[in-house]
Image (cartoon, coloured by chain):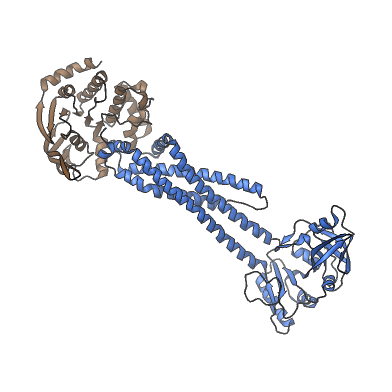
């Protein structure tokens, strides 16, 4: 039997049992669509999270006081330090460690910020001009913190977009004074965009020179030192050198932690990948269920078309041909179902993307291919049994005596 | 062409055994016109099925064109059926979703012959049976006589040596029945071996050789040369 004839013969048979074919097609389509959509959700989530991390940049290294022996996890938010990292430490490192493009101190605290009668509790970040480069923050209006000597406190501040709205509304903020505890700062710049980073909402923060922050919070130590490696410099050796240098500065005591977002990103990436696979595996179960439906419907088709099978055998059809006819039926339906499922899945993804534009949903090609292949394989596998039953039918019994 | 030696076929119905065929010996030559008659349950249909390789005997030998068929596998039997045997059934057994032309084409399709050649062969068969104008119709748009013609067309499209007809006129009125009979006899005159199983005594008597069956055995085997040739001489006019 020629393939084209087999196809035509099968199509005619399917057209005759339209409702049943439609149900079977639908079951496969739903299975394929759910796999495609769930993979897209997982991929979307993964890319979203990675996108958040990429604000920091892969070549960023973070150093904070205190020792954490485990690696790869999130660093402790509050380091319990035996000894602070001071501005002097940082300046020594900047001078002596090669391969650093920019380095910035960070002092963090919470304090009420007020302008006129409006007051807001906000995150205060004491840092330097370099911080904006390391964290890839951009200024919407005005200018960044001035690049002055780090130990000089200047009464200037850059504020986040949200804080600007809350304190000044639509009025001009540049040049205005804000009060922070007992100090006053002149606003010289406003940050651009959301500024989400590491779960810290920088759009609600106020940035002041590090020396000023040390004065406001009355501290000597730094909360963090963030630095950016020069282009082409490997991060791992740099981290080791930083550790060694800090050990020297702290009289042989290894009491700082050096980490890079890279390690965290790969951890998150791995977790989210496994999650995506797991979820799509669950969706694949629906394909197996569709396979069982295919088996039932093929069984029905076989018993309904028993006289026809007898006739075909009387006309000289071999067992192989009879089996091929029923397998083709299941295969054709599964392929059509897979196609419909992919289309449906794509439509669903487009809808989701329209509803949640922030999440980059995507249906990778491997998911489409795997779902379709699985649908086809299960359909053929489950149709094999009933098709074999049809092939083994005794022609006399199948023909019946009417 | 056909030779049966001590052929037996037994069916099991619950606890009892039914001997559909008991030690049947039979020889049929090429081009013969044979009718098989007998009461229900006498084994006529079983004989037909075994001759058509649709069923296997329990014991005994069946030689088709001099070759034994006992040891053949399902594939080889399917090929013999396809190339040497044509079936005509009482209830036509047309595939209802296929047109008359496609039904006739079915054996050629199963044999895998190329479409162009198929078209030519089927066209010739349609012409010969006088149903060329009905080629595009589905079975349920055809009369009983036309359906049986399509079925006959399907049975001869592979040019078999042996045509097995099981009550070919059983579902037809007398006029359509006469037409179908005339058609079968015309095919026989062209050389095909024709074996008709029937209850209908008038149809049975037209054959050149009458087999009667009773309780699984052949109880009568008579040549009716005079009546048969007379009937055949008349048949074309009677049919039209």
In the image, B234: left or right of A378? Answer: left
Q: Is residue A238 visible?
A: no
- Relative to B13, is A125 above or below? below
Tell me which corner region of the image, top left, top right, bottom left or bottom right, holds residue B237. top left
Q: Please tell me which residue lies in front, B205 or B237.
A: B205
Visible residue check, residue A392: yes
- For the C terminus of chain B, the image quarter is top left
Q: Colour of chain A?
A: blue
Q: Is residue B203 left or right of residue A14?
A: left
Question: Splitting the image into 4 quarters, where does residue B76 fall?
Answer: top left
Q: Image quadrant for the N terminus of chain B?
A: top left
**In the rendered image of this protein, does residue A180 appear above or below residue B77?**
below
Q: Where residue A213 sits: x, y (%)? A: 83, 70
Looking at the image, residue A197 sits to the left or right of residue B197; the answer is: right
Q: Position of residue B55 (x, y in %)?
A: 22, 40
**x 16%, y 24%: residue:** B204
In depth, the one of B129 and A65 nearer the eye is A65
x, y percent for residue A176: 89, 59
Hey, which quadrant is residue B109 in on the image?
top left
Q: Which chain is brown?
A: B
Rendering coords of residue A274 (x, y %): 55, 61
Residue at 9%, 27% in the rendered image: B222
């Amino acid at each position: 039997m020629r393939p084209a004839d087999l196809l035509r013969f099968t199509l005619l048979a399917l057209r005759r049992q339209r409702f049943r074919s439609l149900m079977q097609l639908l079951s496969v389509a739903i299975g394929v669509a759910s796999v495609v959509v769930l993979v897209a959700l997982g991929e979307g989530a993964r890319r979203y999270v990675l996108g958040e991390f990429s604000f920091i940049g892969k070549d960023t290294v973070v150093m904070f006081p205190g020792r954490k022996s485990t690696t790869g996890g999130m660093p402790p938010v509050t380091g319990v330090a035996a000894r602070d990292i001071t501005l002097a430490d940082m300046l020594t490192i900047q001078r002596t460690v090669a391969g650093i493009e920019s380095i910035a101190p960070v002092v963090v605290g919470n304090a009420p910020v007020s302008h006129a009668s409006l007051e807001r509790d906000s995150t205060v970040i004491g840092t330097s001009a370099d911080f904006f480069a390391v964290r890839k923050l951009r200024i919407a209006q005005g200018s960044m913190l001035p690049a002055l000597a780090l130990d000089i406190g200047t009464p200037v501040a850059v504020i986040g977009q949200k804080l600007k709205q809350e304190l000044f509304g639509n009025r001009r903020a540049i040049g205005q004074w804000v009060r922070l505890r007992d100090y006053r700062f002149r606003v010289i710049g406003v940050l651009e965009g959301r500024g989400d980073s590491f779960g810290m909402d920088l759009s609600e923060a106020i940035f002041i020179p590090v020396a000023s922050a040390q004065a406001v919070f009355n501290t000597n130590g730094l909360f963090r030192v963030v630095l950016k490696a020069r282009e082409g410099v490997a991060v791992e050796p740099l981290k080791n050198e930083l550790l060694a240098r800090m050990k020297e500065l702290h009289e042989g005591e290894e009491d700082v932690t050096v980490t890079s977002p890279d390690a965290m990103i790969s951890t998150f990436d791995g977790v989210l990948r496994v999650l995506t696979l797991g979820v799509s595996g669950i969706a694949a179960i629906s394909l197996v269920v569709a396979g069982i439906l295919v088996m039932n419907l093929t069984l029905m088709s076989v018993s309904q078309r028993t006289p026809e099978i007898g006739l075909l055998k009387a006309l000289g059809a071999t067992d192989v041909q009879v089996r091929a006819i029923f397998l083709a039926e299941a295969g054709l339906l599964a392929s059509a179902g897979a196609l419909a499922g992919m289309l449906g899945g794509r439509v669903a993804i487009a809808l989701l993307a329209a509803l949640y534009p922030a999440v980059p949903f995507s249906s990778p090609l491997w998911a489409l291919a795997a779902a379709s292949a699985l649908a086809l394989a299960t359909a053929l596998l489950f149709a094999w049994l009933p098709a074999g039953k049809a092939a083994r039918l005794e022609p006399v019994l199948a023909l019946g005596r009417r | 062409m056909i030779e049966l030696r001590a052929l037996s076929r037994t069916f099991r119905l619950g606890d009892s055994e039914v001997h559909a065929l008991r030690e049947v010996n039979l020889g049929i030559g090429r081009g013969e016109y044979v009718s098989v008659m007998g009461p229900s349950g006498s084994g006529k249909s079983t004989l037909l099925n075994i001759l058509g390789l649709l069923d296997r005997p329990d014991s005994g030998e069946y030689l088709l064109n001099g070759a034994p068929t006992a040891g053949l596998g399902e594939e080889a039997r399917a090929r013999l059926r396809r190339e040497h045997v044509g079936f005509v059934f009482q209830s036509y057994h047309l595939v209802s979703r296929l047109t008359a032309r496609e039904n006739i084409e079915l054996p050629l399709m199963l044999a895998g012959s190329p479409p162009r050649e198929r078209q030519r062969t089927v066209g010739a068969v349609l012409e010969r049976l006088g149903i060329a104008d009905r080629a595009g119709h589905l079975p349920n748009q055809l009369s009983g006589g036309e359906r049986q013609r399509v079925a006959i067309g399907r049975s001869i499209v592979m040019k078999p040596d042996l045509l097995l007809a099981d009550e070919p006129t059983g579902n037809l009125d007398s006029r359509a029945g006469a037409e179908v009979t005339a058609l079968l006899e015309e095919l026989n005159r062209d050389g095909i071996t024709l074996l008709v199983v029937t209850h209908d005594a008038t149809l049975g008597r037209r054959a050149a050789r009458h087999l009667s069956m009773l309780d699984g055995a052949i109880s009568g085997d008579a040549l009716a040369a005079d009546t048969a040739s007379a009937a055949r001489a008349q048949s074309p006019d009677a049919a039209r």
